[in-house]
């Protein structure tokens, strides 16, 4: 593509962060902004010197631009992304790609059919540590087990700050689809998709419809088991990933530690003649990732470059489907009280979401909650 890339942004919460990054980028012109909050729209427009301001999405998306950033609440992603693609725009969609996996499938399909870029806002994909972990997992041989914890905190005031938050109609879930969707994306990028999901999601401490605490067991084709847990009722916050395989194990809690086994562990288990024989030597090492700028701005730049260079963005629509599928699977397994197989039965989850929105079904709540 020649000349500067003309960009519009809808939703000026997260969209404002992207605006700042785009304004600093060469070869990009932010030509239009859209938000239903007129006061905010005027203020951000004036600050950024953007002339075309819209409160109506249809008018905004009909305007002349190469790419649209969709940064609105979750329930709007599906219709706004499809409308933007159909009006000829490349699209950067904030995470999650959609609320249901059926919607996400369609969004990725429409982008492919129209030959437009569709990128999803998972900035951790630009983090050198996260990229290194993906590489190191390849050194562990066949995987046997793992653990992933995403433990954080949000107050009731956070949920009260927007009518869409904490609701099935608006957010389409709680901690899983909003915060832990980053973790589920990076996790599946490292480890691939499981074949079976046992899920347990509940509303523990907030006055909301959706989950603030969730656990899952992911089971893989070879039998490997991974425990996943996400919480917004934890203080202090913690994040930890562990994975073990035939050739070693890795611990990632901000720092990366790798244990390499001198030999093949599963062979040793099978062939050692003694009940308590001497297992292979283990060598631990701290592994350092390169120091690089990463985050929202790096991901936004990748999206712009993907348009200019006509290549895949770092996180494509197809990639965005997978974290939505894991979220949906944990919710579905909770409600059905049984494990669910992947690929998830799309139509069943649509029906389940209808029931959740209508209040015909609900998640378990902490027993002592008022
Ligand atoms: N990648 C990240 O780290 C990250 C961080 C925060 C939020 N997000 C994502 O960004 C999106 C927005 O979240 P947020 O926290 O900014 O929400 P927010 O509620 O703070 O902002 C949303 C904005 O969209 C506007 N809006 C609502 N309906 C609209 C419509 N029909 N047309 C035009 N504008 C409309 C609202 O007025 C508001 O200004 C969500 O998908 C969220 O998950 C991503």
Image (tube, helix red, strand yellow):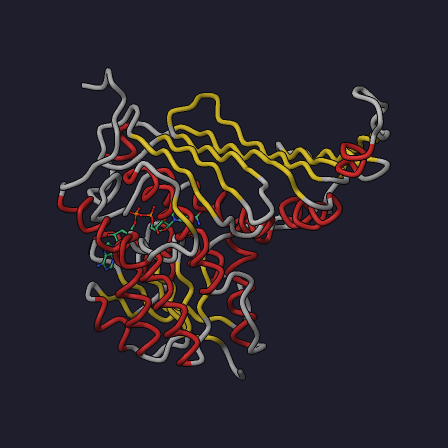
Instruction: State the residue at coordinates (27%, 22%).
Output: 366
The extreme top residue here reads: 368
Instruction: State the residue at coordinates (33%, 42%).
Output: 331
Q: Measuring from the top left, give residue 213's x and y in whole percent.
A: 37, 30
Q: How many labels does the image show?
A: 0
The extreme front residue here reads: 273
Viewed as shown, does residue 220 lie left or right of 201?
A: right
Compared with residue 239, is residue 136 higher up or lower down, i.e. above or below?
A: below
Answer whether residue 42 is visible to the viewer in this image. no
Quarter occupied by residue 241: top right
Compared with residue 110, is residue 182 higher up or lower down, i.e. above or below?
A: above
Viewed as shown, does residue 25 lie left or right of 79?
A: right
Compared with residue 290, is residue 235 higher up or lower down, i.e. above or below?
A: above
Viewer-closest of 232 and 204: 204
Compared with residue 319, is residue 310 higher up or lower down, i.e. above or below?
A: below
Viewed as shown, does residue 247 lie left or right of 223?
A: right
The quadrant of the picture occupied by the C terminus is top left
Q: Measuring from the top left, give residue 52's x and y in whole percent.
A: 29, 70
């Amino acid at each position: 593509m020649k000349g500067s890339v003309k960009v519009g942004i809808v939703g000026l919460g997260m969209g404002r962060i992207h605006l700042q990054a785009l304004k600093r980028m060469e070869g990009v012109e932010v030509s239009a902004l859209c938000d239903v909050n007129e006061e905010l729209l005027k203020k951000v427009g004036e600050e950024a010197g953007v002339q075309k301001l819209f409160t109506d999405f249809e008018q905004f998306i009909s305007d002349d631009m190469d790419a649209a950033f969709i940064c609105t609440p979750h329930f709007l992603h599906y219709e706004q992304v499809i409308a933007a693609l159909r009006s000829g725009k490349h699209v950067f969609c904030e995470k999650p790609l959609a609320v249901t996996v059926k919607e996400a499938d369609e969004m990725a399909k429409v982008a492919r059919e129209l030959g437009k870029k569709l990128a999803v806002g998972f900035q951790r994909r630009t983090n050198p540590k996260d990229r290194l972990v993906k590489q190191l997992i390849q050194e562990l041989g066949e995987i046997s087990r793992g653990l992933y914890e995403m433990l954080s905190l949000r107050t009731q005031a956070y949920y009260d700050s927007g009518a869409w938050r904490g609701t099935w109609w608006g957010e389409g879930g709680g901690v899983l689809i909003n915060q832990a969707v980053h973790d589920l994306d990076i996790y599946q990028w490292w480890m691939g998709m499981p074949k079976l999901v046992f899920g347990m999601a509940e509303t523990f401490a907030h006055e909301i419809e959706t989950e603030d605490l969730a656990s899952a067991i992911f089971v893989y084709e070879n039998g490997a088991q991974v425990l996943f847990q996400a919480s917004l009722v934890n203080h202090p916050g913690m994040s930890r990933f562990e994975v073990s395989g035939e050739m070693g194990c890795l611990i990632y809690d901000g720092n990366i530690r790798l244990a390499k086994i001198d030999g093949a562990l599963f062979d040793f288990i099978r062939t050692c003649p003694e009940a308590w024989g001497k297992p292979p030597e283990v060598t631990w090492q701290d592994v350092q990732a390169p120091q690089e700028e990463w985050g929202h701005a790096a991901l936004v730049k990748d999206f712009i470059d993907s348009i200019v260079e006509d290549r895949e963005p770092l996180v494509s629509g197809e990639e965005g489907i997978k974290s939505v599928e894991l979220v949906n699977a944990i919710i579905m397994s909770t409600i059905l009280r049984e494990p669910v197989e992947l690929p998830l039965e799309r139509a069943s989850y649509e029906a389940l979401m209808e029931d959740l929105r209508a209040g015909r079904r609900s998640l378990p709540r902490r027993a002592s909650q008022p």
